Image (cartoon, coloured by chain):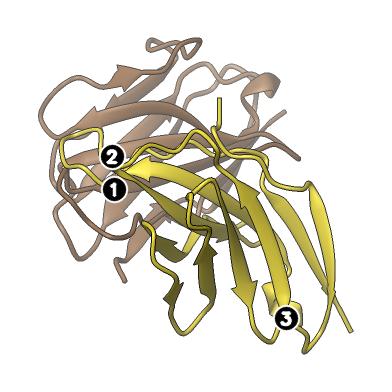
Chain colours: A yellow, B brown
Amino acid sequence: DAKTTQPPSMDCAEGRAANLPCNHSTISGNEYVYWYRQIHSQGPQYIIHGLKNNETNEMASLIITEDRKSSTLILPHATLRDTAVYYCIDASNAGGTSYGKLTFGQGTILTVHP
Amino acid sequence: GAVVSQHPSWVICKSGTSVKIECRSLDFQATTMFWYRQFPKQSLMLMATSNEGSKATYEQGVEKDKFLINHASLTLSTLTVTSAHPEDSSFYICSPGRGDRTDTQYFGPGTRLTVL
């Protein structure tokens, strides 16, 4: 079972910031927080990941609480094309042949409306 | 990012036939391939993990004789759904891995299988 919990759905107005929360209270010290999204009928797409520091890239920002038990993905200016299911995943960044195996929860369905 | 292709993108077949899905890792050598399936309105579920040149490891509840996986090269893995039935209708997605530390995991575009 997935080790993270997310709200099942959220709405956001186009042009506004979308803030998607995730609880990962059982995350261990070597596990990163990854965010992926899946647009309808496509494969998942990597967004961002972090360990304990906040991260930002061209797609989004990731805010991780100091105790690492939760995080928030921020899409600063949501567009209609950001409508998707967003998955928060905690996973070890260790090597080995099992690396890359991700456990997906139900995610958050983000709907961006005009 | 890594380029992963799947073929076909969609397929419709009759019950009892076999369907082969190809997954290609176009710009890096995939020592590992993860195969997921996704039923409507559900999340991705890992089916099996294949390693190049060896037998695949299947998740609990996935029949290895029904879902044949071949990972004969570092750029190609195939999933064959044998004697497909309507309950096998799903979205099948592959994801290659190099078995080492990487920052991201890439996924194929998926194959929509519909069994009539």
Q: Distance between the residues labelled 1 and 2?
A: 4 Å
Label 1 neighbourhood size at 10 Å, few (<14), some (14-19), many (20+)?
many
The residue carrying mark 3 is A17
Q: Mark 3: which secondary structure? A: loop
Is there CB contact under 8 Å for labels 1 and 2?
Answer: yes
Instruction: Identify which amino acid the numbered label 3 is placed on.
Output: Ala
Choose mark 1 or mark 3, whichever is in front.
3
Residue A37, x across and y down, in percent: 58, 60
Q: Depth check: B30 or B115 in front?
A: B30
Which element is circle 2 on? strand
Instruction: Judge if badges 1 and 2 mark residues of a common chain.
Output: yes
Under mark 2, the amino acid is: Met
Tell me the chain of label 1.
B
Q: In this view, does B36 lie above or below A46?
A: above
Q: Name the residue under label 2.
A: B33
The quarter holding residue A21 reads: bottom right
Mark number displayed over residue A52: none
Label 1: state its secondary structure. Answer: strand
Is residue A61 found left or right of B72 in the rendered image?
A: right
Same chain check for tags 1 and 3: no
Q: From this viewpoint, is residue A94 visible?
A: yes
Q: For this rendering, which residue is in front, A26 or B106? A: A26
The residue to which callout 1 is attached is B96
**In the rendered image, which quarter contains the N terminus of chain A?**
top right
